[in-house]
């Protein structure tokens, strides 16, 4: 694939790479993850100062005029450093909804996202919903000009640090209907919201979020009432492209660590990297990473195309990255031996993050089914 980054994108990559190398080393990250807060607000402020939080937004919205490719550049570097700050929940998801919202919503919230003052979390998953974005038990009942929300959202990543939620709820229809889904922006401190916070296996923080008679006005609706699913799918596909880029960064480091270790670890007086069978396995890791990069670029470049093309590209990338991440992570841990399982060694943490990326926004099995269903939709047109 012939793909060149702009000068601005290269500058963002170089600046972020230097920042992570100097201030986000593995031991520092371990201490942050084990701390009470689980993140560094001062690092989030530095990301804002570098322009990372405004990079994907248009100049009309107050951003730097970038788009999904800029988010991809940022996320790949974040993957290399296992960054835990909530870039995808707040900038990619929260910003993704808000930039498609009303002028009033952009004015009230979007500038705060870009400055780092407003932090959003995407409350969409439910305990029984699996990966069906329309499978919602959370309801929003009409109440005068506004709505009243009731329900439970599960594993809301970044929620402990959030100031606002993007919430999906059913405003009409049955539980799994495509129609009748609406998107709301809700302040975290709204009356009736309660949370239960906890760390995730990959070092981030998430919450169970409960809504009990939470009143919101009509101005809280993003997009159309009862027709929010297409918007949710669009933003989710953008998030998929972003975490695929993150996985590419993580795979790159996991592979490099493994190659370096194989040159130092000796058996029978010989570095294990000299053994042909391990050389083959590390080459396979390299190829999995390279293929993942190509699939991520493809998915990112097709986000602006028609709905079916966009969905197929996102699902294809998610399948490839899920499979590759599992292979690279398992090989990295196995070649490191027992050390690879310890908390003190970084490679195991990369494997944990790659495993969680596979589960986010639909795993391999889910996206294989989605891709197959979308491909079947294309068959009549292809036959003609």
Image (tube, grey):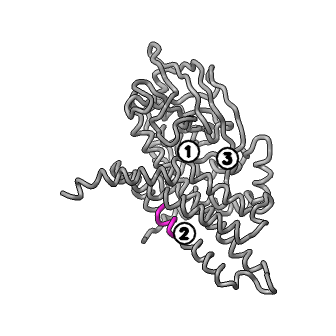
Q: Nearer the viewer, residue 164 or 57?
A: 164
Task: Give me the residue at 51% from left, 65% from top.
Answer: 293
Q: Is residue 296 found left or right of 85 in the rendered image?
A: left
Kindly identify which residue carries mark 1: 91
Q: Position of residue 356 (x, y in %)?
A: 62, 51
Of the numbered discs 1 and 2, the one sitting upstream in the chain is 1
Res. 44 mark: 3
Q: Nearer the viewer, residue 4 or 374?
A: 374
> Element under label 1?
helix
> Element under label 2?
helix
Q: Is residue 213 found left or right of 37 in the rendered image?
A: left
Task: Give me the residue at 47% from left, 39% from top.
Answer: 133
Give the Cα distance between marks 1 and 3: 12 Å
Q: Is residue 373 above or below residue 249?
A: above
Kindly identify which residue carries mark 2: 288
Give the quarter of the image for residue 277. bottom right
């Amino acid at each position: 694939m012939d793909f060149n980054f702009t000068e601005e994108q290269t500058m963002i990559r170089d600046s972020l790479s230097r920042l992570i190398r100097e201030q986000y080393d593995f031991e520092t990250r371990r201490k942050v993850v084990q701390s009470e807060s689980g993140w560094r607000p001062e690092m989030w402020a530095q990301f804002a100062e570098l322009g990372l939080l405004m990079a994907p937004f248009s100049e009309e919205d107050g951003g730097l005029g970038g788009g999904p490719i800029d988010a991809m550049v940022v996320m790949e570097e974040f993957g290399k450093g296992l960054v835990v700050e909530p870039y995808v929940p707040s900038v990619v998801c929260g910003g993704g909804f808000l930039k498609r919202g009303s002028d009033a919503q952009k004015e009230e919230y979007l500038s705060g996202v870009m400055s780092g003052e407003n932090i959003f979390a995407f409350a969409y998953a439910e305990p029984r919903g699996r990966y069906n974005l329309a499978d919602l038990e959370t309801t929003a009942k009409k109440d005068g000009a506004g709505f009243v929300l009731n329900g439970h959202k599960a594993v809301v990543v970044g929620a402990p640090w959030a100031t606002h939620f993007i919430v999906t709820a059913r405003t009409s229809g049955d539980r799994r209907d495509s129609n009748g889904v609406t998107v709301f922006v809700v302040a975290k401190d709204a009356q009736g919201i309660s949370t239960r916070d906890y760390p995730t296996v990959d070092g981030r923080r998430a919450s169970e979020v409960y809504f009990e008679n939470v009143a919101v006005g009509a101005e809280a609706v993003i997009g159309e009432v009862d027709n929010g699913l297409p918007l949710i799918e669009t933003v989710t596909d953008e998030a998929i492209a972003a975490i695929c880029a993150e996985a590419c960064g993580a795979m790159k480091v996991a592979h490099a660590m493994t190659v370096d270790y194989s040159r130092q670890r000796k058996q029978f007086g010989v570095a294990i990297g000299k053994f042909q069978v391990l050389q083959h396995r590390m080459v396979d890791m390299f190829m999995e990473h390279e293929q993942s990069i190509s699939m991520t670029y493809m998915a990112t470049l097709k986000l602006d195309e028609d709905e079916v093309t966009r969905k197929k590209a996102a699902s294809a990338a998610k399948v490839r990255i899920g499979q590759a991440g599992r292979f690279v992570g398992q090989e990295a841990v196995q070649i490191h031996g027992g050390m690879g399982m310890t908390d003190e060694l970084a490679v195991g943490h990369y494997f944990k993050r790659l495993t969680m990326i596979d589960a986010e926004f639909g795993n391999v099995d889910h996206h294989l089914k989605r891709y197959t269903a979308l491909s079947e939709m294309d068959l009549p047109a292809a036959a003609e």
